[in-house]
Image: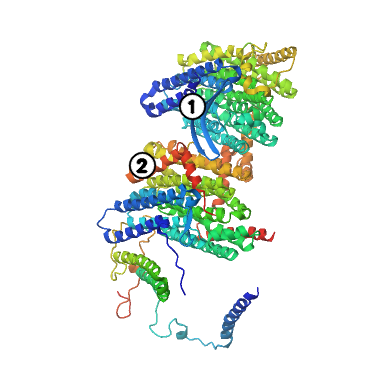
Amino acid sequence: MLDATWLIPALPLAGFALLLLFGKRLGEPWSGWLATTTCFAAFVATAVVFAGLVGRAGDNRQFDQHLFTWFKAGSLKVEVGLLADQLSITMALFVTGVGALIHLYSVGYMHGDDRYPKFFLYLNLFVFSMLMLVLADSFLLTFLGWEGVGACSYFLISFWFERPTAASAGKKAFVTNRVGDFGFMLAMFLIFGALGTLQYAGPGGVLANAGHLSHTTATAIALLLFLGAVGKSAQLPLYVWLPDAMEGPTPVSALIHAATMVTAGVYLLCRVNPILGLTPGALDVVAWVGAITALFAATIACAQNDIKRVLAYSTISQLGYMFLAVGSGAYVAGIFHMVTHAFFKALLFLAAGAVIHGLHDEQDMKRMGGLRKYMPVTFGCFIAGWLAIAGVPPFAGFWSKDDILANAWQHNHALWFIGIVTALLTAYYMSRQVFLVFWGEERWRDGEDHGEPHEAPWTMALPLIVLAGLSLVGGGLNLPFNKHTELLANWLHPVFGDRLHELGISSASKWALAGTAVALGVIGIGFAVAVFIRGRVDPERLEPAVLQHGWYVDDLYAAIIETPGRLLAAFSAFVVDTKVIDGAVNGVASLVRNGGDRLRRVQTGYVRNYALAVAAGAVLILGYVAARAGG
Amino acid sequence: MAQYLPLLAMLILATVFAGGSFLASGLLAPKRPTLAKAAPYECGIVPDREPAERFPVRFYLVAMIFIIFDIEIIFLYPWAVIFRQLKGFGIFEMVLFTVAVFVSLVYLLANGALDWGPAKRLMATPTVDPAGARDPRRTSSSTVRRIGPTGKEAA
Amino acid sequence: MPLELPRVEWATILPETILVVGAMLILLGGALLRRRLPAWVWTVASIIIAAGAMVSAWDLWRRVSHNHQGGAHTAIANAVVVDGFSVYFALLTCGAVILAALMADSYLRRERLNAPEFHVLMLLSASGALLMAAANDLIVIFLGLEVLSIALYVLAGFAQRRAVSREAAMKYFVLGAFSSAIFLYGVALAYGATGSTNLGEIAAFLRASVSTHAVLLGAFAFLIVGLGFKIAAVPFHMWTPDVYQGSPTPVTGFMAAVAKAAGFAALLRIFFSTFGTHRLDWQPLIWALAVLSILVGSVLAVVQTDVKRMLAYSSISHAGYILIGLQAATVRGLAGSLFYLLAYTFMVLGSFGIVTLVARDGDARTGLDAYRGLGQRRPGLALVFTVLLLAQAGVPLTSGFLAKFYVISAAVEAHSYALAIIAMLAAVIAAFFYLRVIVVMYMAGDEADTADADPIRVPFGAGLSLAVSVVATVIIGTILAGPAFDFARHASILRL
């Protein structure tokens, strides 16, 4: 059964190849169905491999399928193989599962788009890359998948490239991610330099030999990998691309920018937990960055009006929770939250997509309202997602968030405090969203008349219902009642071993912590009720401009990265230069551009100047030589 | 450093001599310029305007061909001096060299490098310069002055 | 007085001989039969000659690699060396000649240029490159350098009717002569410091001496400047964009591939093998050159709007990456540089091949605008260019990725961490401008503007050349990566 491992990535790849060759001929809707089928088949294959692993003894649940030798020269040998163990199969299960559902949803959502087959082509390529990332048995192959998902994300964000915002958002995502990739590459070289291999598993692999790393090297590797994770998983300070990435079609936001790709950073850190275990300092950095990001993004989410941007900031915030968990040594809690988050956040995105679909591409929540009568199915599902993320028992989010917070409490009370405040804010902004969209006046009746909002077709509704069910019962994966109900923890235990911090707090304080979390969640919801249903407080006062603009971070980046001269010009000539607002990443490009322009002036075209440069270079070298000879 | 002393002395001497000559002629020579003396050529036809700007390119071509054969001669002379000692090796190498030069001569001849007379189209040269490097006002009749048999400009 | 006459082992310089004799035959044939034969005959002849040289080089390779160190030897009064290194470059150069000849075939007809002369000059230039790689004497290296360069000066100005081409030739000639003089000065200093111009004798002398004489350091400096010019390393790169842009595009491709490879052959052999004992003295210089080339090349490529010029800057940054391998001064680094050159040759020839086709009549359309919407008009061509650009950016599954990986891991192994970091940062910048071209080809330009008036044609020879380049780029990056590495590793066994 385990031999079927290669099928998991091969199926979406086959889908991609078929769509590449026959996509145009298949057209709508068959290309969509083909992609959905391959993704679902990959899920089945994963389930088969999962069953195979379960069939093995507890400490032997690791299967390294060697596919071929990529190249081999001297000491450098790169094997291509897939590693199926508890961690990677858990990831693969929800990637393919949620992926299949979102494919199905897209069949309905993308209806009528000009480039319908191309969308599914990218989507299948994405699933393939993501599975390579997860199932890779070496850093190099993970990196390949890492770059692959980045490229797919880039293509899919700017899928509607006719919109300049979409094109520029794609560019922003690409460049920001490259900063992270840089960290990943460096870490890879360091690992190779120190251990001479990039394979994960096996007696000569990185994981088994991590203990040979010196403390400094391990810290450097951990922090560089974390830099990669920060880029991919949109943490401070590199999160800026994710809100803009909402320019992509909604299924893309759900699949890539909520459920799967953005969690790759968390997965990577869990994968290299033997290295992380060597450096408590690096772990602290991870935990603090995660906690601060969680709080920071949650504050911004409270004041956003775009239905998808709220969810984007919420995703950043929830990813912060996962890093908080990893940094506290609670890897299982991180993975647990990753899975439940995949369920409820994908659900929320897809439901938001259904709302946008029903309202004919309206994304401003201030122009929605009262939709619960018109879209009962979407409404019901959205409620499930809302309760899950707000941490209301027994929904999935309650259990995973509670697990993280309990671990944070044990690790550092300050981290727990940040986490609990974030939980309060989360409950508030999600309630705000629900009330703005589904309750209140029917504000969409203002302005031009689109007709009544309509419920989504069954292809879109079915994934919503399935995900709503999972959001309800997902917590069952890891119930903290006793050792036997902690299914996920028991399953993943061999991967983490003794590096997993045992939760050593008494069951009474556990319940007290959980009670506090629930109470704060309820307070958050209650406050939102007071503001948006009862109208006790003017919402405008709760949404200051600084939060609407996301603490002006984009503008700050633009200001820092742009040259000071340009900044001066921006202040004096135009109070607000459009180019500064344009975004930080365009700033990076223009920094390079400005530098380039200045250098370009040296390129005069006169031979005499070129000869002078050669002579100057020669003199410099001679100067060095003279200094060396003298000294 | 002692062995470089003559070199230094030579350098100084040369500078002193050159500078001294200029200085001496400037100080000693009488200066009584007339119009005829100031002309570029003191005897011959008195030019009534600046000379032409352009020579036919063939002039340079011939000069370059001459240099190639010049070098061949320079190469052949020392070989001829010791060709007995160089034996077969020398002959072989020299034949190789001569063949190479001969091949280029054939190439030149075939391309009409030595054809004198009015310019002949060597190959089918197409249309005008796309880059616009050639000014249409600058033609061979405007830049090359043809002097008639009487010494006056041909009409 | 009896003279000591050298024994000439013709077999050892058979590839060079084939190229030179072949070139002279084409010259004669061209002079006598030009009007009677169609233009493709000269292309075919050129390819046959280059292939012949390749076969003879392959024969040498077999002899060298089969009995390892024993196979490598010097010949012709120690002036020439036959080892894996020299033969590797012979094979690489001849391959480049074949690809460039295929590409030039249709170009010469399109631009109505003289075919025989073009091929003659290219073959002669290639023979110079071979000689540079096989030389065991600084004077012979200089000889090879001049044979290579002088033919290239003429080739750069081959499209005489275009002013930019003439300008390119003039600039290349003046600056090339300047750098040759500096190189020669370095040779003189090396002779002064060690008492020989023979690389083997210099190495023997240096092994025996402990201290570094100031004159020797001067020799390092001038040799680096002279060869740094040929490989277009910053700050000796200023000619590159102008000359690359002005030259006929197939010549640019040939120049970028062969002249750079030959320059590196000389640089690697002189510094790695001959001056290897004094590596601490020259490593910092190479370090600085590598960093400058990588950064300046990448940064300036970003601001270019002309694809040909952008590729020129990208070739400068590639030179920096290849220098990383030399800077490491290990066998691994040397093999990395050699592998990089192999990958680079195909990438750059293919890329300039695309530029040749897209530029169309008059070699004029090289701006980024000419590529707008290429993905719709010529999807095949756009796909090939995409693969080549991705390879240049160092994307996995292409030869470019492995090349960068190999040299950077050699740098890490040699503890040059700063260099490795800078190289990777620059790769991030570089990805931007390669991607920009791809984006322009695929995303922008639904309007079928002037394209229909003058469609891009892909003649058979050019198509074949492109196909070979792109297939080589992909398979060296994937299934043939192992053998290609072995090839480069064997070539790095130098005869000291």
Q: Position of residue C218 (x, y in %)?
A: 60, 61
Instruction: Tell if the residue under mark 1 belongs to the same chain as the one under mark 2.
Output: no
Above or below A376: residue C335: below
Q: Residues within 10 Å of mark 2 (few under 14, many from 20)?
A: some
Query: Of helix, strand and loop, which one carries label 2?
Result: helix
Q: Farthest residue toward the left?
A: C36
Q: Position of residue C476 (x, y in %)?
A: 45, 40
In this orientation, which residue lies closer to the viewer: B76 or A481?
B76
In this orientation, which residue lies closer to the viewer: A443 or C144?
C144
In this orientation, which residue lies closer to the viewer: B66 or A603?
B66
CA gap, disc 1 and disc 2: 37 Å
In the shown orientation, is residue A493 left or right of residue B73?
right
Query: Of helix, strand and loop, which one carries label 1?
Result: helix
Query: What residue is pinned by disc 1?
Result: A128
Amino acid type shown at disc 2: Ala
In this orientation, which residue lies closer to the viewer: C65 or A431?
C65
When asked about the image quadrant of residue A381, the answer is top right
Query: What residue is pinned by disc 2?
Result: C451
